[in-house]
């Protein structure tokens, strides 16, 4: 029996996002977490775009055929995390609350956008909105 593939789609060019995604671990009994760079074309990125979700405004978690976006993605990751190591335990305690995740995620996204602006990165702009290439 094959294990479920759980996809985490994020901006690999964002140092904060990249570090978060490299450290987060899920419980082994749930499946295998696969990290997907949102800047590269992929089937899941096409699916996200078809749903009208702006990857520049939130990471995406696909699990069990379900799509979780932004604060819901980070909240769900916390709930399925392995809780091994300091990072994963802290991630769980901070984001296990759906309400707190909804409050903190926009703050973290604003910090991310500012960081990418300082670094001179362009937006992913998966929705192809004209004039939406820069932070």
Image (cartoon, rainbow, N blue to C red):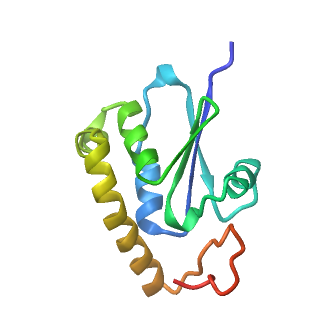
Instruction: Tell me the residue at 46%/54% (across/down).
Output: 70
Q: What percent of the width, then of the height, locates residue 16?
A: 40, 64
* Nearer the observer, 1 or 46: 46
**Residue 14 shows in this picture:** yes
Q: How many marks?
A: 0
**Residue 12 shows in this picture:** no
Which residue sits furthest top?
A: 1
Q: What percent of the width, then of the height, locates residue 52?
A: 66, 59
Instruction: Tell me the residue at 23%/40% (across/down).
Output: 93
Instruction: Tell me the residue at 73%/55% (across/down).
Output: 50
Which quadrant does the N terminus fall into? top right
Instruction: Say whether residue 71 is left or right of residue 59.
Output: left
Q: In the rendered view, tell whether residue 86 sits above or below residue 129.
A: above
Instruction: Tell me the residue at 64%/32% (across/down).
Output: 65
Q: In the rendered view, tell whether residue 28 sits above or below residue 38.
A: above
Q: What percent of the width, then of the height, locates residue 119?
A: 47, 84
User: Which quadrant of the view contains residue 27?
Assistant: top left
């Amino acid at each position: 029996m094959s294990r479920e593939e759980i996809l985490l789609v994020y901006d690999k060019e964002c140092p904060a996002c990249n570090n978060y995604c490299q450290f987060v671990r899920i419980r082994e009994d749930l499946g295998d977490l696969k990290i997907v760079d949102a800047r590269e074309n992929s089937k899941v990125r096409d699916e996200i775009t078809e749903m009208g979700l702006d990857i520049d405004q939130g990471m995406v978690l696909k699990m069990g055929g379900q799509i979780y976006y932004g604060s819901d993605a980070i909240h769900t990751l916390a709930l399925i995390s392995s809780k091994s190591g300091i990072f994963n335990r802290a991630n769980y305690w901070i984001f296990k609350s759906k309400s707190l995740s909804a409050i903190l995620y926009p703050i973290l996204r604003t910090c991310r956008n500012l960081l990418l602006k300082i670094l001179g990165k362009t937006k992913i702009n998966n929705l192809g909105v004209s004039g939406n290439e820069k932070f």
